[in-house]
Image (spheres, rainbow, N blue to C red):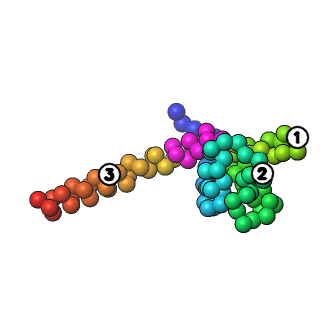
Amino acid sequence: MVKSNALRKTEDYRLDAIFHALSDTTRRSILRDVATGEKTMNEVARPYRLTLAAVSKHVKVLEEAELVARERRGSFHLVRLNAERLREAEEWIAYYERFWTTRLDAMAKFLEGEEG
C-alpha cells in the first residue's frame, strides 16, 4: 500500500515530535517515572532540581509528542504514560535494526575466523 504525501508528512511530524521529546535526559527520566504509574505534577517534579514551571515545560513537550497525557482532577494535574506512541519510534528503529544486526553477524564471523 502506497502512503499519500499528507499521511507520510503527518507520520514524519509525529516521529519528529517523539524523537525531540526523547532527546532530553529529563524528559526520558520523566517517562520512566510515569511508566510506574500515574503521578501528580508535584510527584513528577520532586526528583529534579528544577522549578515546577520548568518540569511543566518538559511535560508539555512530552504531551505534544503524545507520550504522556495530563489530566486535571480537582486541584491536581495528573500525568500518565501513553506507551502506544513509543511503538512508532520502536517500529522506525526496528526497520534499521537489520542493518546493524547484519554487520554484527559479519563481524562475529570474521572474528571467529581469526580465532580458528
Q: Are marks 1 and 2 in contact (CB under 8 Å)?
A: no
Residue 83 counted in the magenta span: yes
First along the sequence among labels 2 and 3: 2
Residue 113 drawn at (x, y percent) = 15, 59
- Checking the image for residue 41, the label placed there is 2
* Residue that mark 3 sits on: 102
Q: Are marks 1 and 3 in contact (CB under 8 Å)?
A: no
Dividing the picture into quadrants, the one containing residue 49 is bottom right
The magenta stretch is 82-91
- Visible residue check, residue 17: no
Query: What is the residue that sits farthest to the bottom in this orientation?
Result: 49
Q: Secondary structure at mark 3?
A: helix
Kindly identify the amino acid type of the residue bearing the numbered disc 2. Met
Give the residue drawn at x 84%, y 45%.
76
- Checking the image for residue 74, the label placed there is 1
Magenta span main SS? helix
Residue 16 drawn at (x, y percent) = 63, 53
- Visible residue check, residue 41: yes
Number of other residues with Cα within 10 Å of mark 1, as a class: few under 14, some 14 to 19, many 20 or more: few
Residue 33 drawn at (x, y percent) = 64, 50
- In the figure, 37 relative to 112: above or below? above
Number of other residues with Cα within 10 Å of mark 3, as a class: few under 14, some 14 to 19, many 20 or more: few
Q: Are marks 2 and 3 in contact (CB under 8 Å)?
A: no
Number of other residues with Cα within 10 Å of mark 2, as a class: few under 14, some 14 to 19, many 20 or more: some
Q: Secondary structure at mark 1?
A: loop
Q: Which sits in the foreground, 86 or 103?
A: 86
73 horizontally vs 98: left or right: right
First along the sequence among labels 1 and 3: 1
Quadrant of the drawing holding the C terminus = bottom left
Q: Which sits in the foreground, 88 or 10?
A: 88
Q: CA distance from mark 2 to mark 3?
A: 44 Å
Kindly identify the amino acid type of the residue bearing the numbered disc 1. Gly
